Each structure stands twice: as structure tokens, then as C-alpha cells.
Image: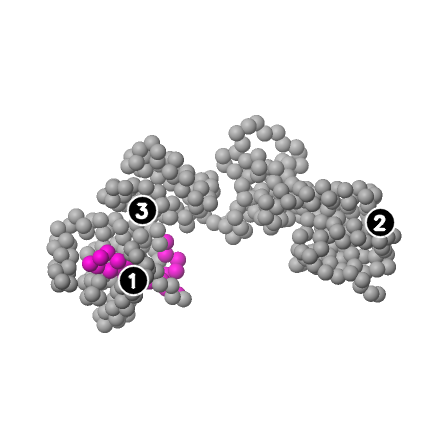
Amino acid sequence: MKKGLLEINELPGVWGSILCSNQSELIESSPPKGFDKSTQEDICRHSTELLSSAEKSVAGLREVVIHYSERKLFVLDFEQIVLLVFCTPSVDISLLRMTINIITTRWKSDKKIQKRMNAISVRRR
Amino acid sequence: MVEILRGNLAQLSLLDILKMLSSGKRSGRLDIHQGAKSGEIYLQYGTLIHAVSGTHLGENVVYTLLGWLEGDFSFTPDIEASEQSINVSTEQIMLEAARQADQWGDIKEVLSSTDAVFNISASGSANTVSLKPIEWQILAQINGQRSVIEIAELLQLPEFEVAKIIYSLTTAGLLHKVTDTQNAFREIVDESFFDQLMVIFIEVIGPIGPIIVEDEIKLLGEDRAAFPQNKAAELVERVSLEISDSAKRAQFQKQMVAVLRG
């Protein structure tokens, strides 16, 4: 999973990425410099809360892009897991979305990753 | 000196103002301003005798000024012209102006404004094209960077004349409009990008691939001949959504992301 995050981070305009469960537990991260564990956990908690409340109003919502003055936060919901990507405003969202799809499709066929995902799902129940 | 008439061309067209001053047998100077540009038209007992805008003189200046749809005007009576540059009758100018005003409607639908920038269309016309010398002169100045007004100034031709020719060359398929001046300098994808996209997409989806790609280019409001680099990934993503099998879609995206990232 770390390798996937590093691939995402290689894209132009990507600053860092974090993977958490939809219960805000930090799973894996390759964050922007200066983001300690507690900051990452805070961001995960706020992002999953935002996704959860937004989903109540917009059915089928899978992604949210939060625009800050100098950064963009791209939040993607994959049911058990939530991917957060920190970007500059110049990031090519289509290129980012396709890269994420390539990586998550690969994860789906990786038994080790699937086992880890299932463990997250079991913990949630 | 007292100004007797002042207003904005958006409320009262220049043609209507000239008709009013001419029928009222007025004498004086009509000043027109549009941003940094300006022009003067002199009347003597209702007859148009002199017009000047920058270094241009005569009736062509009147036709150019008639093309200004926005700007301020003011009429100051009893100012005499220093010279006579208009040598055709006022009625003739009014008739030509009315004809041009009608044509401007069609031209503006394609040009939007004389600040519009055009480029030569790579697909060209399906038919044999013969150009008049003036059309060739204008075509030779089209480079995806010069605006209609800049070409008119460069060739010392009336804006209306240049706009009319660019309009006819565009409707003949020889030119296409660059959406704005900034976009004229945008990076365009290499044709090899489309070659690779077509080959990879046809492999996944079959012979309908090129039709889907062309449709998506149109939906993005772009032209394959001048497709911007910053929309290439968006095009690939949109095209990929036509692949229903998620594994095949991811495989297609993987190949195309490699192409996009060089």
C-alpha cells in the first residue's frame, strides 16, 4: 500500500497522501513534510466526518475536493478505506483519478492487501 | 462650446446617431471613444465630410467606427473639419453602414469581438478553395496569436473588411477560433498522442473507438487539430469511462497514463 501512495506522490502537483479507514484509523501514509501522526489523524477524522455527513445529503458521493487558497485536498471514499491526497491547485485531477484507479484495481487483486482490508472491515463490525 | 449630445453606443447605435445628425442638418464633430481607441467624424450641414481615427482617414473610418458596439460618444456643434477626407455622398455611406450593420450580426456570431484570435484549421476545406489577394493577405497574418483588430491595423485595412473575410474563411472551414488570447499560447498535444490513443482504445473497445474519441473531443469544446495539453488527461479519462469492464478500463488507463507522462 505504501508503494501505491508513493506512486501517487510522484504525480506532478501531488504533495503527499494518506490512507485511513472510514472510522478514521490511520492505515498507511506518505504525508507532506511536517505532518506528524497526530496531525494526520486529525485530518483523517475531519475528512471522514465530512464524507459521512456529505453522503447523507448526496447519495453515491465518492469523492470530495476541498479547495484551500494554496492547496487542494482530494478525498476519495472506497467504502472500507478513505484516501486523502494533498495537492497543489495545478494538479491534473483526471490524471490523479486514473492513477488512483490503476493502483486500487491492483490492490483488489493483491491477496495480502485484501487480507489487510478484510481485517479493517472485521474491526469495524 | 456646448455639447448637445452625449451617451453610450450600447444605448444608441452610431448609425442612429449619424442618421439623427444628418437629418437635422447638424454641423460639428462627433467624438467616439472605446477604451484606448477613439475616432472623430465631422459633419457640415448634415453631410459627413471628414473622419479620422489614429492614422486612418475617410469613409472607411466611419465603417470601422460603426462596428463599435460599445463606447462613449459626444457631439460638439460648430467645430469645423481641418480637411475633407470623405468623398462619397452621406446617403451612400448610410446605405453601406446599414448593410454592414446587418452583416455584423452574422459576423459577430462567429467572431464575438474584434479581439478574437484565429488559427489555420488543419482539416481545411473539403472543396477546392480560391482566394482573392486580400483574403490571402489576411490568411498570411493568421497565426493563432494576432487578433482581428491587430491584423486590421497591421494591414491598414478597415476592421469590418478584415472581420468579414475572417468570417467567410472560418465558415469555409479554413480557420478556427482560438477561444481567447491566453489560449492562443497554450500547449497543443502532438498528433502522435491521438495515434497512440486510437490504437490502444481500438484494441479495448473495437472499431467504434475513433468515433467515441471524436465525440468526446467535441463535448470538451475542442478541435483535434489544436487540442490543449492540459485537457489530454481529461479526454483519456472520459473516453475510458466507455469501457464497461473495470479491469480493462484500468489496463487502458495504465497504458494511457504512461503515454501522458511521457
Q: Are marks 2 and 1 in contact (CB under 8 Å)?
A: no
Q: Are marks 1 and 3 on the same chain?
A: no
- Does the magenta run of residues contain B24? no
Quote the CA–CA distance across marks 2 and 3.
Answer: 68 Å
Q: Earlier in the sequence, mark 2 or mark 3?
A: 2
| SS for callout 2 | strand
Disc 3: which residue: B257
The dot on residue A56 is 1
Q: Is residue B226 left or right of residue A34?
A: right
Farthest residue to the bottom: give it. A38
For the point 54% across and 32% down, the residue is B125
Disc 2: which residue: B47
For the point 34% across and 60% down, the residue is A65
Which image quarter: residue B72?
Answer: bottom right
- Does the magenta run of residues contain A73? yes
The amino acid beneath tag 2 is: Thr
The amino acid beneath tag 1 is: Lys
| SS for callout 1 | helix
Which stretch is magenta? A70-92
- Percent x, y of residue A98: 30, 49
- Percent x, y of residue A96: 32, 53
For the point 27% across and 41% down, the residue is B244
